[in-house]
Amino acid sequence: MTDADHPTAPAGTAAGTAPSLVAPTPGSAGPAGIAAVAEATDVSVGPPRLRRLSIGLALVYVSILAINSGGLGILIPNLVADIDEASKIGNLAIVTTVAFLANVFAQPIAGALSDATRSRFGRRSPWMVGGALLAAGFFAGLPLASSIVTVALIWLVVQLGLNALQAAATALVPDRFPAAKRGGVSGLIGLGITVGNAVGAVVAGSTSGAGALPYLVLAALVLVVVAVFVVVNPDRSSLDETVAGSAGTAAPRPTLREFAKGFWVSPRKHPDFAWAFAARFLMVIGFYGAQTFGLYILRDYIGLSDAASNAFAAQIGVVLLLGVLISALASGVLSDRIGRRKPFIIWASVVMAIGLVVPLVMPTTTGILIYSFLLGLGFGAYISIDLALMTEVLPASLTSGASSAGRDLAILGLATTLPQALSPSIAAGLVSITGGYPVLFISGIVFVVLGALAVIPIKSVR
């Protein structure tokens, strides 16, 4: 999540590289040096502008997650069930897995292209605006779909737009924020993610019977938020962007081979990057496994009617938000203050695992509310720290010319989008094999615990 403001390369990197504000690697300048360079090169890193940028990024994530949660959690499951009730589980898995194609390719490619973009509006803003227009336009047309194929194709295009928007927005964190300040912005973004989940659930759940209204409201939300963001937090023109340390020398565009090669991050050369990827992948698939079929769980496992399940889904969103509010901001700020990330992620895993146990022993609406609160409490702590940790394991040696943070963070972003896309198919398979929904909570416990264990081998982050 970063704008086009990048300082000169830290000491210890090759001449001509400009890792922006990516985390220091051995031999690189530390956070204090990076912050000093940033403050010397761009006034936009001052506290007031950083606060404004942090709040703006949080709101961007609110709009992204509102579409994703409202769409995937309520609107699309209702569409799929209306088209074919008997095959709804398999069909929902098909719709969400098709989006896998967008998630695999769109975010890394959009991130890399935004790194290389040269325009008077900067590197990130054009991709944010374009992604918002694409996602909002097609999402507004989703209720017109009358077949599973049409639903899948429209949702695919919506995901293309949201991935482009998210890739550009995510690159703004290492571009604009010194490492010592990323826990705070990560906490705000984590809060934005959960508020977005709640907003999507409330809007979709409370207006699900109002035809196109929830689609239009959520589409308008992303358009308004992104438009205000790019006006209030303008990108610096990248037309005359230069190679760090070489005043007046235009940053070279990568060749097609260099562009493609940049998407491979060797686990052997960059083990911390690989472990961070694995940790996020496991944690997210554990979180979303049961969430994907949440509406069907309320109907078929808890026993609510269709109308009651739609309304109760909105309540769940509010309770989840309450859990995150308690933990997200406090965790991010405290993590910055004590300079540690991993203990918070382990704590988050324990709380989420306890939450996933509750519906197994209490398959009631009360049990679901307790589960949602604990899941929010744990996920709030996790998401507020995870982005900060991710920016601190970026392989700075991969950068060439302009910052590659957009590409590198988007590669790590696959650890979020891939499990989100794959979890419906995995969950559908588990439900079909076992004949019930409890297996989703059990597998969730296993995945979040494995995700916590995966952060332990990371050496560059405490």
Image: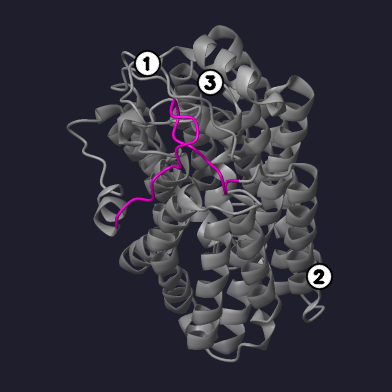
Q: Which residue is drawn at 27% across and 50% down?
A: 258
Q: In the rendering, at what x and y percent does residue 121 appear?
A: 66, 52
Q: Is residue 246 magenta?
A: yes
Circle 3 is placed at which residue position? 179
Circle 1 is placed at which residue position? 28
Closer to viewer: mark 2 or mark 1: 1
Of label 3 and label 1, which has the lower sequence position?
1
Q: Distance between the residues labelled 2 and 1?
A: 52 Å
Q: Is the magenta stretch mostly helix, strand or loop?
A: loop
Q: Vertical placement of 400 versus 290: above or below?
A: above
Q: In the rendering, at what x and y percent does residue 127 appear?
A: 59, 58
Circle 2 is placed at which residue position? 207
Which residue is at the front of the view, 59 or 205?
59
Q: How crowded is mark 2: few (under 14 residues within 10 Å), some or many (20 or more)?
A: some
Q: Which residue lies furthest to the bottom in this view?
A: 146
Q: Does the magenta stretch include residue 208?
A: no
Is 161 positioned to the left or the right of 390 in the image? right
Which residue is at the front of the view, 322 or 119?
119
Q: In the rendering, at what x and y percent does residue 306 appear?
A: 69, 73
Q: Which residue is drawn at 63% across and 68% down?
A: 135
- Answer whether labels 3 and 1 touch (C-beta < 8 Å): no
- Answer whether labels 2 and 1 touch (C-beta < 8 Å): no
Q: Give the range drawn in magenta.
A: 238-255
Of the residues shown, which amino acid type is indicated by label 3?
Answer: Ala
Query: Which SS class for mark 2?
Result: helix
Q: Residue at x 39, y 64 (%)?
A: 431
